[in-house]
Image: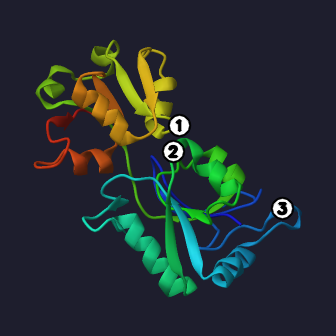
Amino acid sequence: IALILALALACTCFVACGQQQPTNESTPAGEATPAAGGEQTNESDVAYVQQQGKLVVGITEYEPMDFKDENGEWTGFDSEFAKMFAKEKLGVEVEFVKLTTSERLQKLEDGEVDCLWGGVIYNDNLQSKASTSVKYVKNAQVLVMKADRVNDYNDGFEIRNLKFVVEKDSEGAFYIITRNSFKNHTEVESQQAALDMVQSGEADAAVVDYTFAKAVTAKGNKYSDLGIGFD
């Protein structure tokens, strides 16, 4: 079993796994392409979830998409969407499992979670392992550094010698790794850990999701001393 909702550089979408053929624009929303070799279909995945009485959702913690409120309950755009989907479409409850970026797809393939919701890079690797629904969120990668240094840099050439930090296996990591001019970078387990390093001065800048950066650098929030540079 492997259903997945993916938020990537480009978008968020619904996916079914099991060596299935990649979806295309003609695939209706919420409908997986047929599994290869007679493997599980979307219908059998749904039947399994309904039999268990719950949808086990793998999520990556970051505001404003998935985070815990003052009562320790998961909330945020994707979390609330997942709750609504499970209740109204499947008739089951949701159990959230917090996962790191680097372990998400493996946990899905191993069956430890029924689906992933948010934070998955929509690329050829994902499509080779799962089929997706329609996309519903657009995102981007942005540079985050100390607020008083944001205006010191205007383009990639000027920042090439900075010490970067990125979340392991994230779109931000892909961006830095595939641009040979950015040699000095560290990979950590979460976007929060990346911003912690910038805040402490261990790194000059982080490359993170715009939705996350916009939320956590707002006035009064934990990283309000940091600012968003050019994307």
Q: Earlier in the sequence, mark 2 or mark 1?
A: 2
| Mark 2 touches mark 1? (CB < 8 Å) | yes
- Looking at the rendered structure, the secondary structure element under dot 2 is helix
Q: Amino acid at mark 2?
A: Thr
- Name the residue beneath numbered marker 3: 36
Residue 172 figure quarter: top left
**x and y, in percent, of residue 60 in the image:** 45, 53
Q: Nearer the viewer, residue 161 or 53?
A: 53
Q: What is the C-alpha distance between the residues marked 1 and 3?
A: 27 Å
Lateral position of residue 209 relative to residue 178, left or right: left
- Name the residue beneath numbered marker 2: 101
Residue at position x 43%, y 79% in the image: 84
- Looking at the rendered structure, the secondary structure element under dot 3 is helix
Q: Is residue 124 above or below residue 228?
A: below
Question: In which quadrant will I find the N terminus?
Answer: bottom right
Q: Amino acid at mark 1?
A: Asp
Lateral position of residue 3 relative to residue 174, left or right: right
Q: What is the C-alpha distance between the residues marked 2 and 1?
A: 6 Å
Callout count:
3
- Name the residue beneath numbered marker 1: 169
- Looking at the rendered structure, the secondary structure element under dot 1 is loop
Q: Can you see residue 113?
A: yes
Q: Earlier in the sequence, mark 3 or mark 2?
A: 3
Lateral position of residue 41 relative to residue 12, left or right: right
**x and y, in percent, of residue 103 in the image:** 58, 45
**x and y, in percent, of residue 81 in the image:** 42, 72
Residue at position x 47%, y 57% in the image: 118
**x and y, in percent, of residue 29 in the image:** 57, 73
Closer to the camera: disc 3 or disc 2?
2
Q: Amino acid at mark 3?
A: Ala
Closer to the camera: disc 1 or disc 3?
1
Q: Is residue 231 above or below residue 54?
A: above
